[in-house]
Amino acid sequence: MRQIKVEKLGDSNIWAVEFILQQQMNECFLRAQACYDSPCAKIKNKPFPIEDYIAWYQKRSKNKKADVYSDCYGINVPMKYVYLLQKLFPNLTEPELFIIDELININKINNNEYIIAFFKKEKLYETIKKHEIAHGLFYIDKKYRKITTDLINSLPTNVFLEMKQFLLSKFYSSSVIIDELQAYLISDYFSPIIDLYALHSYREEITRNFEDCCRLDNI
């Protein structure tokens, strides 16, 4: 099938799946990811045909040519959603069957662990990988999640709302906004906002917390 690399990151319960191409990654994980964090009530935590999701995405984008397979640059999803894909979704595609077999049958990954994925042929590879690791830590590490959530909640209200509005415009569910905010901050996506409001010490603190947790877990 496809050449991929699957590895557990250090002592954490985060598993990284590295693909060569973006299309391959999204064909494997698109429905599991959308089931986890889509803002659409007909998609989140429910089985759905891939055609329905693409139609919803294009309608929400107000662009009939919008291509979710090329718009998504990384995957972050609790492993239980891969099990959910296997259990509830009818008519699984060949790539979905492949990734289910790879993660569940071959690597024996438990449903309380976390999956991140990215692809090698991307100039922002290291930045995207860092972003996805931040998601993994937020999900599996209670201490990291608490410290990070406290830091996010300490942002000035106007800054928080500006960042939140940006993420909602990118079709994230409100249930994952804090997680997404910290991952975007860790990967320096919000640097212009941080610079505008002179929040450099805040960025240093949230980055230090991320690096400390990575060190503790040997990531």
Image: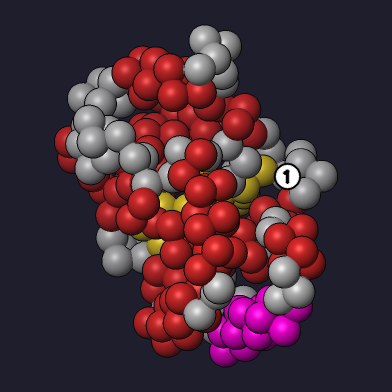
Q: Residue furthest left?
A: 88
Identity of the residue drawn at 37% across and 34% down: 31
Residue 22, percent across and down? 64, 34
Q: Is residue 27 left or right of residue 56?
A: right
Main SS, magenta residues? helix
Q: Is residue 185 left or right of residue 93?
A: right
Give the vertical position of 50 relative to 169 (above or below).
above
Q: Is residue 179 left or right of residue 120?
A: left
For residue 178, which quarter of the picture? bottom left
Residue bounds of the magenta highlight: 200-216
Q: Is residue 8 left or right of residue 44?
A: right
Residue 156, percent across and down? 55, 73
Q: Which residue is under mark 1?
A: 120
Give the vertical position of 15 relative to 2 (above or below).
below
Residue 128, percent across and down? 67, 53
Residue 181, percent across and down? 53, 61
> Looking at the picture, which amino acid does disc 1 mark?
Lys
Q: Is residue 78 visible?
A: yes
Q: Find numbered disc 1 in the image and state the secondary structure of the residue it sits on.
A: loop
